[in-house]
Amino acid sequence: MFLTRYPMALSTNLRREMSNLLDEVFGDWPNGSTPAGRGFPALNVWEDAEHVYAEAELPGMKLEDIEVLVVGDELTLKGSRAEATGENATYHRRERGAGEFARTITLPYEIDSDRVEATLKNGVLTVTMPKAEAARPRKIEIKAS
Amino acid sequence: MTACQSIEKTNSEKPVAARVTPAGRAFAPAVDIVENADAWRLIADIPGAGPNDIDVQFENGLLTLRALVAPRQREDVRFTHREYGVGEFRRSFEIGEGIDGSRIIAKVSNGVLVIELPKAEKIKPKKIAVKAG
């Protein structure tokens, strides 16, 4: 029944599942969770009436290791993570990455870049970006005529 | 020598002592396993988890990490990009004989969990002095 009613949905889900599976095995740092072509870090972006929010998981980084830039409707995250081990250490398993990263994403709205705030807690970076005046929803009053 | 081997709990072929099986979907954190002269270190990325969210158990040679991360956004939020999920982290490792189980230390900082597994005295590399004779 599922097949006949939603044939397209089935093939899309199947394709996505296979894609996710392959990404887990062959994808980039960290742990194959970001499909090639999008880069690190993986981003979750959401909005409400006044703001756009972006969140990225950046474990093991401190404030001074991360740079957040907002220009117009583009958000750029840059930074680097040092290796966690010292000298004379032998790796038996290496799944976490280290090194530099940079990623730019286009947001759905223009941002007022003077009022952007970013917080880092437990390795999660949250960027709060107020929408530029022109992009905010305006309630239009309907007058009887 | 492999004092540490990892097994995914769901794929374990050997029966282990009965324990409560956690239900639900969980993410396996990326882990580095490093050895130096005194200890093994297991370094796991668990972004979003603080010291109170993490549970590390060592029982019968099995080291289990669990970190419960509460969802950070409400259910009804309008996502424009959603590239990762937020939820429980869970992973287990078989620890070999050479580890002193009573001295395992776990620390977390900036979303990275570091578990130090000190080697038991008997397996530490010892330098043997060579005398003329």
Image (cartoon, rainbow, N blue to C red):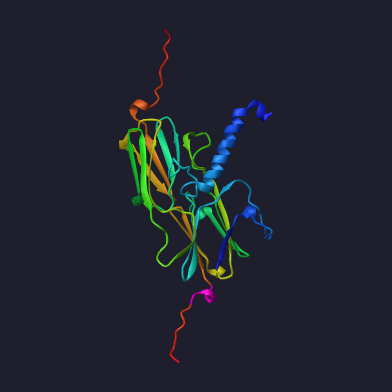
Residue at (35% x, 31% y) in the render? A110
Residue with the most extreme bottom position: B133
Residue at (46% x, 79% y) in the render? B127
The foreground one among B50 and A44 is: A44
Q: Is residue B40 visible?
A: yes
Above or below, comparing residue A134 to residue B133 in the picture: above
**Residue B40 location, x and y as percent?**
50, 66
Which residues, given as a range, are shown in magenta? B120-125
**Residue A134 location, x and y as percent?**
34, 26
The foreground one among A75 and A138 is: A75
Badge count: 0
Kindly indicate the quadrant of the structure image that contains residue B55.
bottom right
Q: Quadrant of the N terminus of chain A?
A: top right
Q: Is residue B70 visible?
A: no
Above or below, comparing residue A21 to residue B65 in the picture: above
Q: Quadrant of the C terminus of chain A?
A: top left
**B61 part of magenta stretch:** no
